[in-house]
Amino acid sequence: MSETQLARPRMLFLFSDTGGGHRSAAEAIIEALNLELSEQVETCMVDIFKDYAPRPLNRMPDWYPRMVRIPQAWGLGFHLSDGSRRARLLTGSAWPYVRRSAKALIAQHPCDLIVALHPAANAPILRALSRNRPPFVTVVTDLVSVHALWYHRYTDLCIVPTLEARQRALKFGLQPEQVQVAGLPVAQRFCQPAGDRQSLRARLGWPQERRVVLLVGGGEGMGPLERTAQAIAAAGLPITLVVVAGRNQALRARLEHYPWPTPTLVYGFVREMPAFMQAADILVTKAGPGTISEAFNAGLPMVLYSRLPGQEDGNIRYVVAHEAGLWAPRPEQIVASLRILLEDPGRHAQAVAACHRLARPQAARQIARLLAEKVGIHSSRPDDLETRAYR
């Protein structure tokens, strides 16, 4: 039972805009709660760094894009802190500094359930809570290489996206009954058909007769996107190249003025990414967990060309081991990987089938039902959750 009695059960979602995955996962779950429960619960999202962390930690969302531009330093920090003892030492050392902020967050947001979607939320919030606390659920937003900070022994439920993440949770001391595999939550628009490929391409103005390679680098256009696009275009492949530069306006301008030797379409930030994925033949992307999960749902084979060391290493192993795509960190390797998928129909079909097997398009709805049960509500919708891709 929570410390306060509310008219409707209130769920508090803790995230931070250190990368797009934490916010998008929270929004996907809230969207699924609305679909499943139709206003039976209240929800609130709080950025733990921007809204409550003491200075200078409240600037963490602003610093993040600069930090990941030094990937080797990021990887070093990941590995140095990734361990049960090291994680406890880190959070214990930070506690005197963040204690007041953690207690203020709890006091100002009374709720019936706390949902943590950021590893930095677990230890301080659980320590700040009183004994008469609401249930605490962790939703892990990394696929495989899950940092020890995600796994806290006092969480009531830890929801993970893969069996590999579950095994890691058990390794770090969680009990089997604490851990549930549900997939990675993504927005509903990535979980349902946008239309058949022919009509999608007609609407998007893409050619019907050529295969389409979709190149993305995340919402901020991160990674070596420009160099990768130029290498693909110069390879003489029988394709149309679609490049999504995200919110990076300077990159988009350079790409739009580049003399492309192969048919190329350049976009900025797009809301129609589900349609793009369903209309494309191959995705070339960095190894972010959200994009990979969306590609699984779309049945779209991948060539992964960039990753955050430590945090995303496991994503590459996962995709390659399950034959859903290839790892190609250099431009010449990207071109070679594209040739394999373009020239070998069997290999491409194998990758499509692998994506179908790995797809969890109902992850957000399954998580929504698990959260609802924690506040004593059961979905009135039929138990029709399918786990197959829709392509």
Image: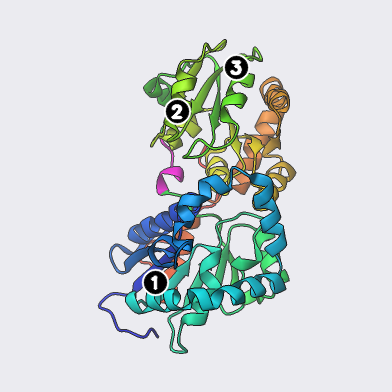
Residue type at the position of mark 2: Ala
Q: Is residue 269 visible?
A: yes
Which of the two labelled residues, at mark 2 and mark 3, occupies the earlier sequence position? 3
Which residue occupies the foreground of this view, 71 or 234? 71
Tell which circle, 1 or 2, labels the residue nearer the N-terminal end.
2
Tell me if 185 is positioned left or right of 7 in this view: right
Real-space Cα separation, disc 2 to disc 3, in angstroms = 20 Å
In the image, residue 169 lies in the stretch drawn in magenta: no
**Few, some or many C-alpha atoms within 10 Å of disc 2 (few <14, some 14-19, many ≥20)?**
few
Q: Secondary structure at mark 1?
A: loop
Q: Could you say where residue 131 lies in the image, as x and y percent from the top left?
A: 47, 89
Q: Which mark is residue 233?
A: 3
Residue at x 69%, y 64% (from the top left corner): 82
> What's the mark number on residue 250?
2
Front: mark 2 or 3? 2
Residue 133 as seen in the image, left or right of residue 360: left
What range of the chain is rendered magenta? 188-194
Instruction: Give the quadrant of residue 305.
Output: top right
Residue type at mark 3 is Ala
Is 75 on the left-hand or right-hand side of 371?
A: right
10 Å crowding of disc 3: few (<14), some (14-19), many (20+): many
In this rendering, the answer to whether 299 lies above or below 378 is: above
